[in-house]
């Protein structure tokens, strides 16, 4: 298998990459929480201006932005499930459980499901990540109408039963269960005090924008190719402009093929690792790896791992 060849060639080079300290990790989490808070307050100010088309358009933009910040927290959970966010495993578990608490999720459940996704990619009997959304047919070969269906599915709300789950189990521990219940209580009080602002910019952003972005991300990652059986073929990179990636693919989420080939690479190094892999003829010949496949000259290597 091509993926096995690449792993044998690059595993040693990609081993031991720098992870965040616990302090840096918590600061990144705080940054996402701050962005969400400021966006909600900005949305509340917009609503005070009164109804207009400009206000509506800006409000929708803020809702989508908040959904992307929720995705940033979710991507940190993903990194922590691989123990690639912080240096110490215990810090990864703590950060992951805290972020899962903020999203009314369970880190332990997520970790088990996601690791099965890497071990059994596209096998609906064992890939718990994709088996839960089997009915949405992400495995179907991409045709014009299949792409249209994936685009409109969130607007019809068909994805909600598969992507909207509030987990109040205690598998992460009593502390995080109490935290989720306390967060729900605070949210309830805020809805009473600021009904429109909280309903639109927190609840609706979470229910509709965040879930839609998660669904579309799964489509971009695997739609039409997941049944191939080879990790090199079953995932794709999305090489969007850097500014667009920072908003819609937080934490280098767009380099999903690199992640599936080398799940031990910290997200902060996925882009750099992608450029190293483009030196390899197998990798750079894949359309799901690079935007313009080539088997000719390798891309010149640069110093992509600067000292901390």
Image: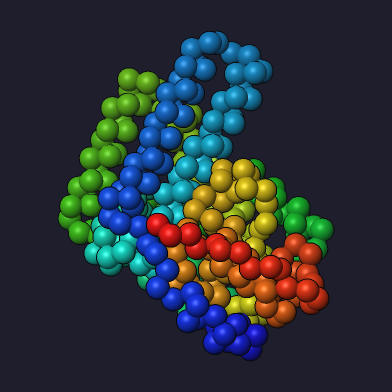
- From the top left corner, tell me how far across and down residue 92 is, in percent: 31, 61
Q: Is residue 119 left or right of residue 285?
A: left
- From the top left corner, tell me how far across and down residue 112 is, in percent: 37, 71
Q: Is residue 143 left or right of residue 274?
A: right
Q: Is residue 268 above or below residue 243?
A: below
Which residue is most to the left?
A: 174
Q: Is residue 264 left or right of residue 101?
A: right
Q: Identify the residue at image location x=42%, y=49%.
A: 73
Q: Is residue 248 above or below residue 21?
A: above
Residue 110 figure quarter: bottom left
Q: Of 203 and 23, which appears nearest the observer?
A: 23
Q: Quadrant of the N terminus?
A: bottom right
Q: Of 203 and 303, which appears nearest the observer?
A: 303
Q: Of 84 and 127, which appears nearest the observer?
A: 84
Asked if residue 33 shows in the view, the reply is yes
Q: Is residue 284 above or below residue 250?
A: below
């Amino acid at each position: 298998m091509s993926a096995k060849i690449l792993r044998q060639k690059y595993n040693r080079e990609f081993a031991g990459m720098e992870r965040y300290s616990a302090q840096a990790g918590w600061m990144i989490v705080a940054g996402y929480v701050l962005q969400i808070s400021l966006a909600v307050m900005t949305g509340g100010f917009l609503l005070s201006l009164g109804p207009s088309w400009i206000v509506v358009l800006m409000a929708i933009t803020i809702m989508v932005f908040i959904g992307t910040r929720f995705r940033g927290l979710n991507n940190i959970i993903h990194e922590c499930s691989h123990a690639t966010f912080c240096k110490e495993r215990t810090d990864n578990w703590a950060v992951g459980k805290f972020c899962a608490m903020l999203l009314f999720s369970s880190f332990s459940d997520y970790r088990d499901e996601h690791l099965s996704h890497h071990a059994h990619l596209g096998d609906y009997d064992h890939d718990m990540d994709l088996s839960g959304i089997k009915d949405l047919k992400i495995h179907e070969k991409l045709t014009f109408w299949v792409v249209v269906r994936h685009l409109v599915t969130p607007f019809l709300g068909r994805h909600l039963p598969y992507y909207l789950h509030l987990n109040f189990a205690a598998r992460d521990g009593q502390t995080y269960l109490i935290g989720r219940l306390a967060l729900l209580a605070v949210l309830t009080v805020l809805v009473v005090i600021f009904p429109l602002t909280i309903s639109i910019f927190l609840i609706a952003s979470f229910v509709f924008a965040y879930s839609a972005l998660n669904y579309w991300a799964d489509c971009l990652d695997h739609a039409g190719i997941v049944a191939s059986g080879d990790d090199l073929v079953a995932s794709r990179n999305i090489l969007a402009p850097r500014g667009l990636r920072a908003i819609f693919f937080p934490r280098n989420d767009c380099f999903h093929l690199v992640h599936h080939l080398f799940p031990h690479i910290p997200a902060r190094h996925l882009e750099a690792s992608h450029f190293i892999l483009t030196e390899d003829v197998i990798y750079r010949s894949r359309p799901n790896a690079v935007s313009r496949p080539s088997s000719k000259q390798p891309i010149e290597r640069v110093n992509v791992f600067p000292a901390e």
